[in-house]
Image (cartoon, rainbow, N blue to C red):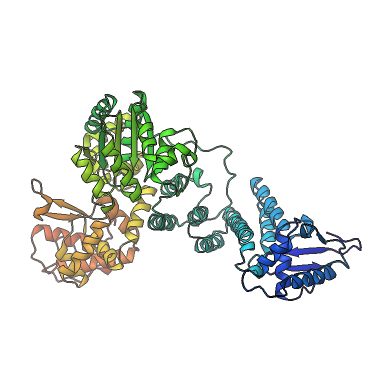
Amino acid sequence: MNSRHGHEMRFGVLGPVEVLRDNVALELGPRQRRLLLVRLLIEDGRPVSQDTLLNDLWPTDRPTGAASSVRAHVSRLRAALDPVWHGLLVSGPSGYALKVPREARDTTLFEEAVGRARDALRGRQLPTARQEIDAALALWRGEALAEAGEHAFAIRERARLDAALDDAKELRATILVQQGETELAIDVAEGLVLKAPLRETSWALLMRALYAAGRPVEALKQYERFRDMLATELGLDPSPQLRDLHTAVLRHDVAVLGTAVTGASLPPAPAVTARRPRPAPFVGRTAETARLDVLLAAGAAGRPQWAVIDGEQGAGKTRLLDEVAARAAAAGFTVARTRAGQALSGNRGISQTCPTVQLLDALRQDGKDSAEDEVAQKDPLATVVDELTQGPTLVVVDDLDRAPQGFHRLLRRLSQVLREAPVVFVCTLRNPDAPVSSVLLADLALLGATWLTLEPLTLDDVAELLAAQGEFASPAEVAALHRRSEGHPFTLVDLLALPPGRRTGPDAQIPAAVRNILHARLLELPDTARTMLAFAAADGEWLDVGLLADAQGLAPDELLPLIDAAVTARVLEWDAEPGTADTTGTGRYRLPELPRDVVLSTQTASARQLRHAALARELARRAGDEAVVERLARHLRAAGPMAPDMSPDVTPPGVTPHSPHPRSPR
């Protein structure tokens, strides 16, 4: 803004308050006078009464001459401003007002520059967007309204400006990602999540930046970190949008992520939302589907039914829920869906509303906010019961063991009051032993709830899935796919997305999503457990505990805690002997094919050779039956130039002592 004498003025609150005349700061006087200026600037030209000024400037211990002091400070400020900008600070019956034009405020300059940066980003004008956002952020000289500190009159405006600053930093990080400066974008995003740990958009940005930097495993770990923090502090789950981003990282879905790996220039963002891939054909759950059909029929007849489905992540629980929901909808049921106690239909993201309101949102599906329903507020349980009994209703509760305690209590009360109603509840669990679910599950057991445990798919299921996709496979190919996937539906679907020649055999690939999941599990293990797995992967599928201990210079009982940790992380499996119960302890530990391939892929060639050499040295000390000789020969070949020298009496047939050994495929 220019005065009548052509002087430019600027008022700044993005830091300590300042007034500039032709870029030269005016002397504003002592702290109380500066506080008065901040108070008037916040009102944006509206008058402030003297009583309000007295209360705001001296909230406690007001001096005797406070009113005179206000008048004196107003006079001094007017004297400083009026020689250049006459009539700026005015007084009247309603109080004092500071008539500063919007264009003379640094907050306006900041907001306008951020707006131009957003427009440029939408137009894919990245250099312009970067220039504008950098200019906007350069206007900040410290904390907004710094003089006001924690004065009550400034709290709301400071919060607004701080949120605008965070928005601007997120915008800058987004621009940096799209310009390929991913490491700088990560630094910005990490600073944002440290400042506001519950701000979900900053966590989403951090995940995108890490993925764009070629660090998808770290992006997944940040998601888990945020999810655990939400569950611990608020008993909530990430919003559907963030869960979709998590899935996109797992699947390397760049259409959802809106970026490409490691920093090259990015393609324009799609104009429309990319279509999700069609779900895989539904196979292998005939018995479970039939039992759920029986429950739907009983529920439609007015007899409330409860079912609990358990299975590890990726076992097909959600796919089964999709199927039963479709069947219920076709039969005239209203279908309400929640995940971890959060309504999915309302799409309200992270919400702190009570469990009853969440369930009402899922039941109503009309977009109305049940938190504003006066009837529901007066008697929430009765309102839920009324909604449930309007007609046949299926309530799907996914990830029950991750829902807050309040949601469990709500379901327990409903199980007690719903005695004659056309209602079916179907709940899924990842961990049936989670303490959070134990009381509810005990109540449901007394009601005769149906319990379904999702087992791995069978060989016939794999063959059916291939046939449903129009592929013919020999029994040997089906068996190889089943062995590599362990019958795990998520893994199997990702394997089938690969070209046929890259699913199994010597040219097999590891699907990206599966690799990321397994990498994340490995990173949770201590270094000693990962070392143990590296030796185990070199040796083969079945763990030889004594050999692994000897090769690492450990006693077997020192190795067992590491094995237990790997089993808990779902990297190793315990296979009981056929016909025996797991509790007998009869069986063997096994490193499945895909985890073994991932472990091997994390090692350099020389590290693998050293481990093969260590295993060969220990095997050479064992009695030379045919099986041991064959294993020793394999390890000597795989050790290559690292193979230990063997005397002729322990050198396996076909291996020449004291000579380089051909390297194995692994």
Residue projecting furthest to the front:
64
Does 110 sit left or right of 501 as displayed?
right
Q: Nearer the viewer, residue 210 or 299?
A: 299
Q: Nearer the viewer, residue 51 or 53?
A: 51
Quarter where residue 83 is shown: bottom right
Q: Nearer the viewer, residue 386 or 607?
A: 386
Residue 15: x %, y % from top left: 67, 67
Q: Measured along the vertical axis of the image, is residue 655 above or below residue 235? A: below
Does 62 sit left or right of 371 as displayed?
right
Does 438 sit left or right of 144 as displayed?
left
Q: Measured along the vertical axis of the image, is residue 235 above or below residue 551? A: above
Q: Measured along the vertical axis of the image, is residue 368 above or below residue 219? A: above
Residue 596: x %, y % from top left: 27, 55
Q: Say whether residue 498 is visible.
A: no
Residue projecting furthest to the right:
5
> Residue at left 43%, top 40%?
378
Does 366 sit left or right of 383 as displayed?
right
Instruction: Count up the numbered dots.
Output: 0
Q: Quadrant of the N terminus?
A: bottom right
Q: Nearer the viewer, residue 93 or 252?
A: 93
Q: Say whether residue 190 is visible.
A: yes
Q: Quadrant of the C terminus?
A: bottom left
> Residue at left 31%, top 42%?
411
> Residue at left 74%, top 69%?
18
Residue 523: x %, y % from top left: 35, 61
Residue 332: x %, y % from top left: 36, 23
Quarter where residue 219 is shown: bottom left
